[in-house]
Amino acid sequence: MATFFKFIVRSVLILVLMALSSCSSIIYQPDNILHAHPDYFKVKFKAFILPSIDGTKLSAWHLYSKSPKPKRLVLYFHGNAQNLTSHFLNTVWMTEQETDIIIFDYRGYGLSEGKPEPIGVAEDGLAFLNYAHSEFIKGKYQQFIVYGQSLGGSIVLRSLEDFNFKKDIHLLVLDSTFLTPREVAREKTFWPLSLIISNSGTADPKLSHITMPVLSIHSTQDFVIHHDLGLKLFESIKTSPKKDMWSFNDRGHGDVFFVQDKKYQKLFIEYLGN
């Protein structure tokens, strides 16, 4: 009994200490290292700065298709670690497939100003949804695709609540993602510790604003975000006119396009044609 009591006291103390500090470092793990560059892939790109809703300056890249007349524009919400110079590697192959890509860094990531926190990063996402939509109209693309990977999926779900042009989104991709950080923490820690993770800045769990087609992608062997969280999210979406889920068995996280001899690259482009 004494041992159990000490365990409870120690757990409560940990909770208090972590609550008094910021839990942002648990959720967000940015760096400002240059991990890779589009020049290596012979991809033309434009680096630019866009102000967020509150004026925070955000860094972004527009990667240009190798086709003179690209069919689609992808806006990419990346995961929680590093910055866009590593995450663009997940999408650069699409420039070979008549696709332009806009990828950006949330506040506090890479060259973006500020410090990441839930409300702010959701506003960052909204700013880029608005910007990418204007580029979609101006560029006369056939398809506007919004792609959220890992933490980026949770962010985009919240950002979309305030986006006024949801009807123009051809497809929302939710790759290896989840609805709230707290549910991830609940699976990875002693459950009381998950209580310090705020759900502020996350989407309404009813997800009634998801009115566009959805493709969910998740490995059954994902060691970062468990497959059951992706499945739970997929099943929670009730208002999409068309939704599909791709589950695959390769161990990994967010690397669907590089497993099984890259077969999902071809399947994804074919899927976009349907």
Image (tube, rainbow, N blue to C red):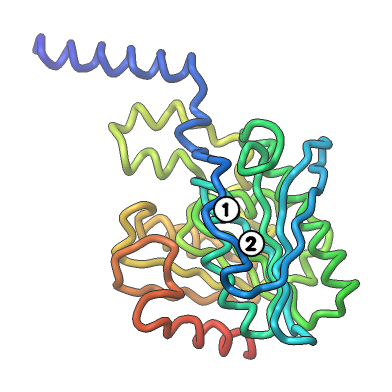
- Residue pictured at 31% horizontal, 41% vertical: 188
The residue lying furthest to the right in this view is: 138
- Residue pictured at 63% horizontal, 85% vertical: 97
Question: Which residue matches tag 2?
Answer: 76
Instruction: Name the amino acid type tagged 1.
Output: Gly
Q: The N terminus lies in which quarter of the figure?
A: top left
Question: Which residue matches tag 1?
Answer: 152
Q: Is residue 56 above or below residue 63?
A: above
Q: Badges 2 and 1: C-beta atoms under 8 Å apart?
A: yes
Instruction: Name the amino acid type tagged 2.
Output: Tyr
**Residue 83 x, y percent position in the rendering:** 57, 49
| Cα distance in 3D space between marks 2 and 1 | 8 Å
Q: Nearer the viewer, residue 8 or 95?
A: 95
Q: Nearer the viewer, residue 204 or 45?
A: 45
- Residue pictured at 61% horizontal, 49% vertical: 155
Q: Is residue 6 left or right of residue 249?
A: left
Residue 85 in which image quadrant: bottom right
- Residue pictured at 63% horizontal, 75% vertical: 42
Q: Nearer the viewer, residue 208 or 24?
A: 24
**Residue 153 x, y percent position in the rendering:** 56, 56
Residue 237 in which image quadrant: bottom right
Q: Residues within 10 Å of mark 1 (few under 14, many from 20)?
A: many
Q: Secondary structure at mark 2?
A: strand
Q: Is residue 205 above or below residue 74?
A: above
Residue 3 in which image quadrant: top left
**Residue 104 x, y percent position in the rendering:** 68, 53
